[in-house]
Amino acid sequence: MKQDTTPKNTRWLVATSVLVGALVVGFAAFGMKTTDQAEFCGSCHVMSEAAWTHSQSIHAKLACNECHAPASLAQKLVFKAEAGTRDIFHNSFQRVADVIHANPNTKDVVQENCIRCHGVTVSKVAMDSKPYCVDCHRSVPHKTRTPLAKRMAADE
């Protein structure tokens, strides 16, 4: 019979490390899921209009970051950290524009997600005149409050 020569302290350290690692991963997964949702995004007064219009749209069942963050977990972590830091800074120092416009990086991410979900449709569209789906379909995920009778075709 072979004797166990591993010190008890080493086993305790390994077990504790595994437990702490599992807790960190669990809290991180919970945080990622929570911060992806419209309820979280709309809790900031700056985004309340976007959250409301999203709730009225055909995309209402989707989490915000299914469109607004990369699909890849590694890219999503970096993207959310950068965007969250920028948003906290702008909100804290009241440097939020009256009309929020997506930066080119965000537009690229949204475009990739449009293609990921609607690839067949997008493949049949000539994208020669405008580079992004939302250039023509900006009100699809975030309905405008303009009455239907007064909307232009591009607002649909």
Image (cartoon, helix red, strand yellow):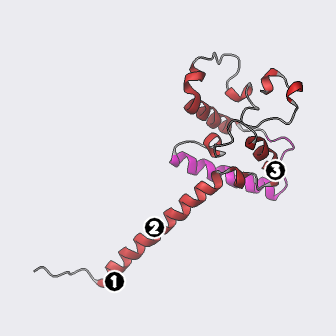
**Going from the N terminus, do you reach mark 3 or mark 1 first?**
1
Quadrant that contains the C terminus: top right
Which residues make up the magenta segment?
73-100
Q: SS class of the residue under badge 2?
A: helix
Q: SS class of the residue under badge 1?
A: helix
List x then y, in percent, for residue 30: 57, 60
Disc 2 crowd rating (10 Å Cα; few below 14, some 14-19, many 20+) is few
Q: Is 127 drawn above or below residue 26 in the view shown?
A: above
List x then y, in percent, for residue 151: 85, 26
Q: Tell me which amino acid carries mark 2.
A: Gly
Q: Residue at x 74, y 43 (%)?
A: 55
List x then y, in percent, for residue 101: 78, 38
The residue that mark 1 highlights is: 9
- The answer to whether mark 2 and mark 3 are in CB contact below 8 A is no
Q: SS class of the residue under badge 3?
A: helix
The residue that mark 3 highlights is: 46
Q: Main secondary structure of the magenta part?
A: helix
The residue that mark 2 highlights is: 21
Q: Tell me which amino acid carries mark 1.
A: Asn
Horizontal arrangement in the rendering, residue 40 relative to residue 78 (left or right): right
Which image quadrant is residue 64 in? top right
| Residue 101 within the segment the image draws in magenta | no
Q: Is 21 drawn above or below residue 69 in the view shown?
A: below
